[in-house]
Amino acid sequence: MEKNQNMDGTNEFYSTRLRAGRRTYFFNVKMTKKGEKYMVLNEIRKKDDGSFERTRIMIFEEDIYGFLNKFKETFDVMTGARNEGGQK
């Protein structure tokens, strides 16, 4: 994907979204001016009054594997994968 220079001085390398009813999730990979990569997860939620609420999480490159491991662990609990697959 082409790099886009944003107003905040970061370069965006990747961007995709997931629409889920009243919620839209954005997944972005950016790079700081110092050359450090990070991921931004945004949730935009339409409220009953028609306004929007935004939640943002930033995950830095040095934390990405720990985040992925905990995400997968939580995913497995939510989907029952741990019980079905015989995992602990």
Image (cartoon, rainbow, N blue to C red):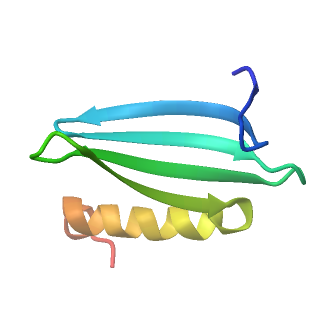
Residue 73 position, x and y percent, is: 39, 69
Viewer-nearest residue: 86 or 62: 62
Q: Residue furthest top?
A: 2
Residue sitting at x 71%, y 37%: 7
Q: Residue furthest bottom?
A: 88
Q: Quadrant of the N terminus?
A: top right
Q: Is residue 63 above or below residue 2?
A: below
Please indicate whether residue 13 sits to the left or right of residue 48 in the image: right
For the image, the number of numbered tags is 0
Q: Quadrant of residue 65?
A: bottom right
Please indicate whether residue 65 sits to the left or right of residue 61 in the image: left
Residue 84 position, x and y percent, is: 20, 63
Residue sitting at x 9%, y 46%: 48
Please indicate whether residue 80 sits to the left or right of residue 53 in the image: left
Viewer-nearest residue: 3 or 5: 5
Residue 56 position, x and y percent, is: 46, 57
Q: Is residue 44 above or below residue 13?
A: below
Q: Residue furthest left?
A: 48
Q: Quadrant of residue 82?
A: bottom left
Q: Quadrant of the C terminus?
A: bottom left
Residue sitting at x 37%, y 42%: 25
Residue 41 position, x and y percent, is: 48, 51
Q: Is residue 46 above or below residue 59?
A: above
Please indicate whether residue 18 sits to the left or right of residue 59 in the image: left
Residue sitting at x 18%, y 39%: 22
Q: Is residue 13 above or below residue 31?
A: above
Viewer-nearest residue: 29 or 74: 29
